[in-house]
Amino acid sequence: MPTKAAEDFLAALADELAISDARYDQACRSYESLGDWLHRPESSVRQYDPQVYVQGSFRLGTAIRPSNDGEEYDVDSVCVLRDLDTGDLSQADLKASVGDEIKDYRSAKGIQKPVNEGNRCWVLTYADEAQFHMDIVPAIPNSAQRRILLEAGGFDTRWADSAIVITDRRLPNYEDVTDEWPTSNPKGYAEWFQERMGPIFEERRQILAETISASVEEIPIYRVRTPLQSAIMILNRHRDGMFEGRYDDRPISIIITTLAAHAYEGEAKVADALFAILSKMDNSIEDNGEIRIIRNPSDPLENFADKWPLYPEREDAFFEWLDQARQDFAHLAKQVERRQLVESVKPRIGVVASRAAERMNPPSSMLRPAAAAAGIGAAASGAPAFPNTRREPTSPKGFA
């Protein structure tokens, strides 16, 4: 069993890593503003019914503060032209059409930094004081085709309606009109993730809605912080610290998030969730005898570990990180003094560990009203008994 001090420290660490509501609101205003721009009368893509929405950690409520003042927040978003399909244009055509509008938007809004092109997205970088940039992925719907393929494979089709295809300039057919596009489903993934948070999400969402006199439907995922979200935030920061200087090898966030969500079983406190996740995190990695598979729950045909065969060092890095995380947090669980708590994880967590120790057991006035009412930030309990990292993981029980 972890000490009471360790439980309090983990809850405080999650609070310290969390970004402010103002940052989330800033991200929302940014992609909503771009969406309005694309619907203006002069827009060259207005007739295709564009929709811009956030994806990734900002959508899931797992975004964390940058480790230093020089880093920027990375806001991932999608721009879907809903009245197009793959037979209408090439990936290059779609990328260029959306890119032209983003460049015009940048000029009209007086954004000084140029729009940069990524392999799959356009990068819109705001002023230095804003401290964030937005990655905008052009996309078109792909629900009908994806449903057919999922049904043929005997996979869950619950999230197929929100499936999309995206662009990737590294592909040989990038400039061809073809049905072979990269696939994605960020909306479906967010719905799956919300399900994995379980009843505790709905309970805390209801409390927050009552606190601010809003309807439950008006409260997005990122406004409610559950133990699952907090545990993922802590694990991602531990990963960042461990792989500082080894960025290309570090386990990607979508793998950590997916495996953590599979392992989570509704624990009500941060420590319970973290220790349960670490003990079972590799159980949902499939092994078909040739490759390891971490399925996208919203599209089981997609393997989040598809780069591991090409870059085996990344697979090794994942298990290296999981072993280290288990060791570090098992050691933390035994500590009772604040200095020992900090030192047990500071090599990977960084200075945020010291700040977390300073804010342990804050008065209720320091918590969000809804957080205090729902017990968010309270101590957790659980037994941090971690197995050795498995090299022969079992198949997952399911993706719901």
Image (tube, rainbow, N blue to C red):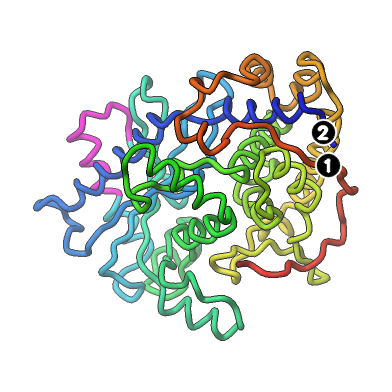
| Residue nearest the observer in this picture, 347 or 358 | 358
| Residue nearest the observer in this picture, 200 or 84 | 200
Indicate whether residue 112 is drawn in magenta. Answer: yes
At which x and y percent is residue 330? 84, 35
Residue extending farthest to the bottom is 152
Chief SS of the magenta region = helix
Q: Quadrant location of residue 350? A: top right
Residue 2 image label: 2
Type of amino acid under label 2:
Pro
* 100 relative to 44 in the view: left or right: right
Q: Which residue is depicted at the point 87% across and 43% down?
A: 385
Q: In the rendered view of the protein, which quadrant contains the N terminus?
A: top right
Please say if 126 is above or below 193: above
Indicate whether residue 225 is drawn in magenta. Answer: no
Q: Which residues are magenta?
A: 99-114
At which x and y percent is residue 221? 45, 47
Q: Quadrant location of residue 187? A: bottom left
Kind of element beneath mark 1: loop
Residue extending farthest to the left is 41
Label 2 neighbour load within 10 Å: few <14, some 14-19, many 20+: many
Whether label 2 touches label 1, CB < 8 Å: yes
- Residue at numbered disc 1: 383
At which x and y percent is residue 98? 29, 53
Q: Which residue is depicted at the point 38% across and 45% down?
A: 122
Q: Which residue is depicted at the point 78% across and 53% down?
A: 280
Please say if 194 is above or below 302: above
At which x and y percent is residue 192? 54, 61
| Residue nearest the observer in this picture, 97 or 238 | 238
